[in-house]
Amino acid sequence: MIPVAEFKQFVEHQPAFKVLKPWWDVLAEYLTVAMLMIGVFGCTLQVTQDKIICLPSHEPRENLSEAPCQQLLPRGVSEPVGDPRELSGLRNNLDLQQYSFINQLCYETALHWYAKYFPYLVVIHTLIFMVCTSFWFKFPGTSSKIEHFISILGKCFDSPWTTRALSEVSRENHKDPAAAGRAMVTMAAAAAGPGKAGEAEKEKVLAEPEKVVMEPPAVTLLDKKEGEQAKALFEKVKKFRVHVEEGDILYTMYIRQTVLKVCKFLAILVYNLVYVGKISFLVVCTVETSEVTGYASFCCNHTKAHLFSKLAFCYISFVCVYGITCFYTLCWLFHRPLKEYSFRSVREETGMGDIPDVKNDFAFMLHLIDQYDSLYSKRFAVFLSEVSESRLKQLNLNHEWTTDKLRQKLQRNAWGRLELALCMLPGLPDTVFELNEVEALRLEAICDITFPPGLSQLVHLQELSLVHSPARLPFSLQVFLRDQLKVIRVKCEELREVPLWVFGLRGLEELHLEGVFPLELARAATLESLRELKQLKVLSLRSNAGKVPASVTDVAGHLQRLSLHNDGARLLALNSLKKLAVLRELELVACGLERIPHAVFSLGALQELDLKDNHLRSIEEILSFQHCRKLVTLRLWHNQIAYVPEHVRKLRGLEQLYLSHNKLETLPTQLGMCSGLRLLDVSHNGLHSLPAELGLLQNLQHLALSYNALELLPDELFFCRKLRTLLLGYNNLSQLSPQVGALRALSRLELKGNRLEALPEELGNCGGLKKSGLLVEDTLYEGLPAEVRDRMEME
């Protein structure tokens, strides 16, 4: 006997696959089990008990076609009775072996094939149905996707984050509806002005009765490990969605196997209805065995015909029900677009409006999931929402960046403000806004920042830096930052990425922008209007502008410092600078300038000018600086200037002159007439000598002559008795004049990189010079008298 367990492998697959089996597939599976049992039972009887019993017929051969066996059955009688002639004891003269031979021969030749092979056909057809039903679970091209989907689906369903996200949505939906009204009143009052704001606040307090605030139920907390697992799930869902939505092999395979089952059902139904009547209890057998047995016709009894007939009708009934499920499946497949799945109802229920609709195989599997339990797709949708993912990232960030950890990163920046700098984080931790002592916030390489309402807790915040960190700011926080923020620095790939809310901060005093204009817009250099920035005093722009942005004139009445860094791109139009009447500091760095712009000479309030890293070769226009009567600092360093014109003597009010990193070989004697000069930097040039007239600079405190080709210093240089810093390193000096001792205020002296053999002992007369301020080779220092060295080493 064949045990049913032998067929277990045809129907056994992972229990998790049941979520992809709708009710009709489950019903069809039970029907195939029933049909398989019928087939196995029939096969067992066929093998062990099925036989045919034959008796010789005494009818003449010419009457054989009239079915002599039918005469043995009286009308209305369902079971055969003995023939009267048999009862009379008619002998057939056949032995046992002859009967056995006839039985086997008639079984093979006279019994209809349907009656013989019916149980085997049932088993074969049932196995085909089973294969058709579960083939897509086994086929390599589909099983891998299904297994991956089921694995992710189970993790999403069981993830604590799913419960957390849905609970948060539930809390938001049940918040006090009056909160929105109170917020609107506050915003309207703020827009109306301070006086009306106070009245509105007073009316609000009087109108609202005292309420008892009920705390919402606590949301399930996630530990760090659960948060990381949920984060990994989001990545898996993203990759799986991209992979599965590319094709529709699952959908196609399911349709093909369903169509195959329908065709198979129709074929089985037709031939079974045609041949089921061939299962007969009495069978006429006509064989040429007269030479062996003496008879040519026999009347045979098929012992299991009655039972097989009942099994056949039972099997046909199951097949019909199975066929109905197949037709229903086809109607379900073609009645609606199963290659598209909409989460509209989930979006409305959960409030996560960003859950995307899906297509192809992803959509088809979700339709099947809904037939099992729609809760699966609802919980799975949480991991398709970018809002949900951002909330999870926020939660993980808060776990990682605690208040204590952030407080350890606080330090004073170059401008003396207590700064918190965060770099390359997936988001902005909420714990940042618990540090209300923060004065400066620097965010670098943090994507998609949306400032939460907690930003208003940073009551001391004055400076904000956004370095490749696009940020969105709600309107309510714009009102807060509008009067709170004093300095903002924004660095991005293109200047059009600068957030628009930046240009509405009316309390802003410093605006620093860094980015490039697109090539087609670089010549126009269009920048957002600066009219709202009524208190802006410092504007810094690092870009590739072809001209000074026209919007700079919007702040001409109060702008005091303008810095344009062009990264080598040539700045052509500078006429708009003339409108900056109160400008005190101007930086035109790396702007490709070959001459000093004439527009600069119209700036009567200008005090500092920096033309660093341009292409200046001649500075004959320096005479025109006499119109800039307040000019005290002139930086012409990092250019290609070959000489300084004599007109420099006109700049009597100049206090600082930077000419380093140029191509100077001499200095004009007229430079000594700049009596107000306190700092002169001519380092990194090609100077061979110095004019004696430098000794006239009685106010000079800082003189940088390093990295030149000086061989001798004029004695007159040491008449500059106020000199505190003298940098002579890396020249060709062979000796240092003893008159250096006259520089009693000298506190820093650099002599490294020269050809000095000894230092004058008069250095001991420089009362302010200590060992730390003397930069010279150790051997030269050791050559000084011991008492000089001791004095320098004294604190």
Image: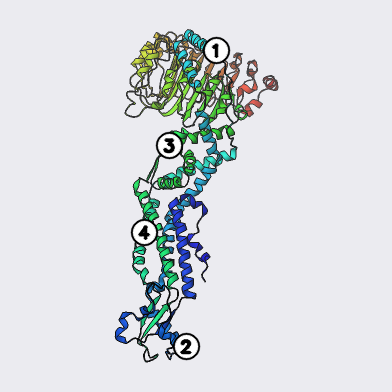
Does residue 460 appear in this view? Answer: yes
Give the residue pinned by disc 1: 720
Q: Position of residue 44 (x, y in %)?
A: 49, 71
Relative to 410, say whether 72 is above or below: below
Q: Nearer the viewer, mark 4 or mark 2?
A: 2
Q: What residue is disc 2 on?
A: 96
Q: Secondary structure at mark 3?
A: helix
Across and down, in percent, residue 197 comes to 48, 11
Q: Few, some or many C-alpha atoms within 10 Å of disc 3 (few <14, some 14-19, many ≥20)? A: few
Which label's residue is closer to the chain start, 4 or 3? 4
What residue does disc 4 label? 260
What residue did someone put label 3 on? 345
Side of 778 relative to 78 (left or right): right
Q: CA distance from mark 2 to mark 3?
A: 79 Å
Point out the frontmost of discs 1 and 2. 2
State the image coordinates of residue 298 (x, y, percent, origin top left): 38, 83
The residues bearing labels 4 and 3 have C-alpha atoms spaced at a distance of 35 Å
Q: Nearer the viewer, mark 4 or mark 1?
A: 4
Q: Secondary structure at mark 1?
A: loop
Pick whichever of labels 4 and 2 is earlier in the sequence: 2
- Is 57 located above or below residue 326 in the figure? below
Q: CA distance from mark 1 to mark 2?
A: 148 Å
